[in-house]
Image (tube, grey):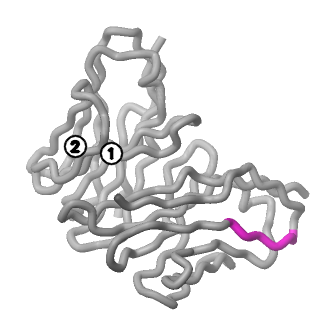
Amino acid sequence: KAGVTQTPRYLIKTRGQQVTLSCSPISGHRSVSWYQQTPGQGLQFLFEYFSETQRNKGNFPGRFSGRQFSNSRSEMNVSTLELGDSALYLCASSRTGGNEQFFGPGTRLTVL
Amino acid sequence: GNSVTQMEGPVTLSEEAFLTINCTYTATGYPSLFWYVQYPGEGLQLLLKATKADDKGSNKGFEATYRKETTSFHLEKGSVQVSDSAVYFCALKGDSGGYQKVTFGTGTKLQVIP
């Protein structure tokens, strides 16, 4: 069974631009969560989607948004990028009712 | 709200030393507890878990016991190897505003030297 995949793996953008990151969960998993990881703040929860609906949201500004498609693939978008958005963005999927999250390798975003 | 507190890193040990990484939590009800590991350049992967009080999770020589009386889930290994060098995250999954939400600690970096 293929693991969680994230594309792209690396991304360089400039301030003010917007970016879209993609996550494909493990086949059969309907829950997808997104996290931002930085050296200073650690691992911070962004949002969780289940069956195309946002079920949970962390404390991030409205510039951060996401969606989930009917095949459970998810995208997150960051608009008007700031230098502080430079981070590793991790996606995790889990099966319905499951406790364990399965993480992808992450997308390393650098904002210049 | 729910929270997880881990010991500050980095932790530097010699090969074959005993490892303890402390983790305590605050949560309502009966959360499930986890340890995840992140190797350089990779995402997190589940190391072990425990879903109820007094459960012991174990994997690859690592162990942690769910202690509800002390709200702790300390990670231990009797003899670490260089290949254990990684960042370790303690986490809980518990009720938060009607939903089951995962909360992570800040991570503890472990460096094992030969």
Q: Residues within 10 Å of mark 1 (few under 14, many from 20)?
A: many
> Which residue is under mark 2?
A74
Q: Is residue A57 left or right of residue B21?
A: left
**Residue A50 or A2: which is nearer the viewer?**
A50
Nearest to viewer (mark 1 / mark 2): 1
Residue B101 placed where, x, y %?
A: 30, 61
Q: In this view, does B35 lie above or below A70?
A: below
Disc 2, SS: strand
- The residue most toward the bottom is B54
Quadrant (top left, top right, bottom left, bottom right) of the C terminus of chain B: bottom right
Which numbered disc flags the more N-terminal residue, 1 or 2?
Answer: 1
Q: In which quarter of the image is residue B74?
A: bottom right
In reply to whether residue A42 is colored magenta, the answer given is no
Q: Mark 2 and mark 1 in contact (Cβ < 8 Å)?
A: yes
Which mark identifies residue B111? none
Query: What's the amino acid at mark 2?
Result: Ser
Residue B17 placed where, x, y %?
A: 86, 70
- Please report the residue visible at 89 percent of the width from the left and 61 percent of the height from the top: B14
Q: Is residue B57 left or right of residue A72?
A: right
Q: Is residue A100 left or right of residue A57?
A: right
Q: Subunit of mark 2?
A: A
Residue B26 placed where, x, y %?
A: 44, 67
**Residue B1 or A8: which is nearer the viewer?**
B1
> Which residue is under mark 1?
A34
User: Could you tell me how far apart the alpha carbons at marks 1 and 2 are, in whole angstroms?
Assistant: 9 Å
- Please report the residue visible at 44 percent of the width from the left and 26 percent of the height from the top: A109
Q: Is residue B43 above or below residue B37?
A: above
Task: Tell me where the magenta segment starts and ends, as one range.
Answer: B16-21
Query: What's the amino acid at mark 1?
Result: Trp
